[in-house]
């Protein structure tokens, strides 16, 4: 029977007593930086300076209502009552440019999911809600949406994001443009921090109709967010 040297014994005791963090046991990923962590946002923020091009519409969208952003996010954002739901809209942002998209909301007594399906970017916010006296409902917290999924002809496709923001590519655009209702209903998949994986979130059928306007003829040659890392 072999005996551990005192130094080795102390090292073993320290290792056994130290808590194991998730980032220490997760697989290596994200290429050059080889960081072992589970957080999706950090790898997208390794570039300190990023130059973005203004978004532009690839063509005309006749009959789609145009809204110009004139106030900050507290008044004109995902939960603003100034934008119609489940209808295509064109948003003119004084900084980021012009895009087309559709707003959707799914509320019940305990949570609410607000989303904007933009031509180049999807944004989702999930908040927990509590009912107080006299039927008054208040927001009690929010959850970070880390992954978004949508069914397509091959099964379903999942995109990882950051802070509830997901980039649109050709595969995501095609899946949204060609989505078919399931028993008269529409669903997407969402995963938030601590949610134990992807969960179904219902989407309004009229939003699905709007997807066809927003995403039909999406092309990487004329669509997608253009950005460049700066020194």
Image (spheres, grey):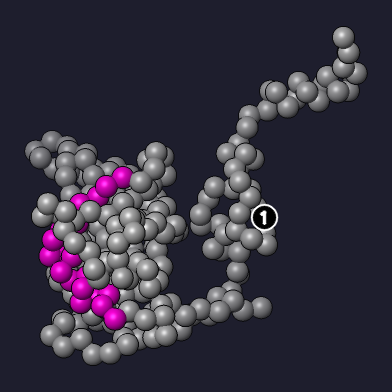
Whole-percent x, y for residue 204 in the image? 15, 59
Residue pushed farthest top?
1
Q: Residue at x 51, y 78 (%)?
A: 227
The C terminus sits in image quarter: bottom right
The N terminus sits in image quarter: top right
Left or right for 50, reference 58: right
Instruction: In this rendered view, identify the residue nearer to me: 193 or 178.
Output: 178
Above or below, comparing residue 98 to residue 125 in the picture:
below
Left or right for 88, reference 34: left
* Tag 1 secondary structure: loop
Left or right for 174, reference 203: right
> Which segment did they paint magenta?
199-217
Q: Residues within 10 Å of mark 1 (few under 14, many from 20)?
A: few
Residue pushed farthest front?
154
Q: Residue at x 56, y 63 (%)?
A: 45
Check disc 1 and report the residue beneath it: 34
Whole-percent x, y for residue 117 in the image? 28, 67
Q: Residue at x 46, y 84 (%)?
A: 53
């Amino acid at each position: 029977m072999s005996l551990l040297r005192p130094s080795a014994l102390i090292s073993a005791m320290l290792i056994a007593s130290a808590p194991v963090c998730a980032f220490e046991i997760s697989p290596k990923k994200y290429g050059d930086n080889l960081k072992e962590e589970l957080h999706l946002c950090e790898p997208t923020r390794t570039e300190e300076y990023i130059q973005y091009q203004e978004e532009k519409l690839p063509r005309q969208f006749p009959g789609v209502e145009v809204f110009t952003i004139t106030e900050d996010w507290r008044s004109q954002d995902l939960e603003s009552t100034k934008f119609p739901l489940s209808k295509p809209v064109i948003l003119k942002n004084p900084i980021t440019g012009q895009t087309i998209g559709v707003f959707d909301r799914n509320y019940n007594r305990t949570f609410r999911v607000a989303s904007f399906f933009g031509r180049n970017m999807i944004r989702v916010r999930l908040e927990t809600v509590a009912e107080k006296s006299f039927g008054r409902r208040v927001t009690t917290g929010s959850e970070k949406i880390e992954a978004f999924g949508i069914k397509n002809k091959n099964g379903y496709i999942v995109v990882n994001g950051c802070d509830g923001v997901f980039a649109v590519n050709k595969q995501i655009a095609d899946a949204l443009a060609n989505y078919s209702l399931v028993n008269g209903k529409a669903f997407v998949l969402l995963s938030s921090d601590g949610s134990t994986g992807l969960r179904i979130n219902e989407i309004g059928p009229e939003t699905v109709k709007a997807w066809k306007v927003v995403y039909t003829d999406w092309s990487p040659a004329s669509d997608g967010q253009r950005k460049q890392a700066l020194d």
